[in-house]
Image (cartoon, rainbow, N blue to C red):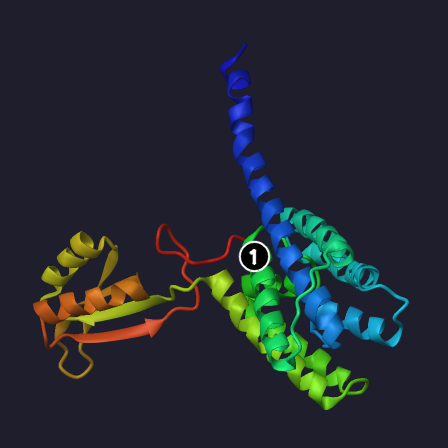
Amino acid sequence: MTNEGKHAPAALWPPIRQAAGTLILLAAGSAVCAAAVTAILIPRQFVSGGFTGLALVVHYLWPVLPVSCLYFLFNVPLFAASWFFVGRRFFVYSAVGMAVFTGALAWVQIPIPLTDPLLSALLAGILMGLGVGIILRSMGSTGGTDILSVILFQRWSVRPGTTILASNVLILLLSLVFFSLEIVLYTLIYLYVSSQIIDVVVMGLSRRKAVFIISDAWEVISGRVLKEIDRGLTILHGEGGYSGHRQRVLYTVVTFRELGFLKRIIREADPAAFVVVTDTREVMGHRIGNQPPW
């Protein structure tokens, strides 16, 4: 037997493990989302956004039509488009995810004894945001605005929560024709909470900070950052616009938790240092990156 044949099973293990992890995330996220729909949204007659919202609106108008079947039918055109705009692997996983979510809508029935509509909206937002966030952390989605949010994030870095919230608002405006303003407002609360939870789950709690440091003690600061914080940095060559004085500029990206430690290092090395701290939308790279795996 050749060496290539001997190592074939080992080479297949990482893809199989990755596929299994993706399926687990899709199943878990779909179950959580379905629980939010069947246990809170439908009993409280809340509307939703995206294709789930369209399915709910049609179901409320014609109760004989099940939400699961409506959701599946509404997704067919978007999946056809995703074949051209999204990777094949994402397409396959999303098709599986849509099938899993459709089944979860039909089979997941978990009673949640809440009578207060505001608390119901908050809990529904938490559950839906958690479920969608888990799904988006995988290599696929359950269809609908999930696919649209991934396309916009990949091409223009639009946050998934922003895309989903915008599409949800459009659905809510249309829902005002069929439902009371009170129901729509409670639904808006649920959608806003879910969009915030999605961003937390997808992008992470630890927002990365980009830091520019201009100091005569740049060598001391850079050495301590490399040694004590264990973060890489870049040394830029700058020049004062007015004075013309040449100066080294340090650039690094740290987590929010590490930012206080970095400030202390700077103050101890050079209290007169000029420091600029900015938020980052996303960071790609080993160890410090927070970009979702799409």
> Image point 14% across, 65% down: which residue?
265
Which part of the image, by quadrant, shows the C terminus?
A: bottom right
Q: Is any part of residue 289 visible from this angle?
A: yes
Residue 114, how many percent across, how many down?
65, 73
The N terminus sits in image quarter: top right
Q: Residues within 10 Å of mark 1 (few under 14, many from 20)?
A: many
Residue depicted at 14% across the width and 78% down the height: 244
The percent position of residue 128, horizontal first and vertical second, equals: 62, 66
Against 181, is 15 above or below?
above
Give the residue displayed 51% in from the left and 21% down from the top. 7
198 with respect to 273 (left or right): right
Residue 43 in percent (x, y) is at 75, 72
User: Would residue 216 be visible to someone looking at this image?
Assistant: no
The quarter of the picture where residue 289 lies is bottom left
- Residue at which label 1 appears: 134
Q: In the image as oriented, which residue stretches furthest toward the top? A: 1
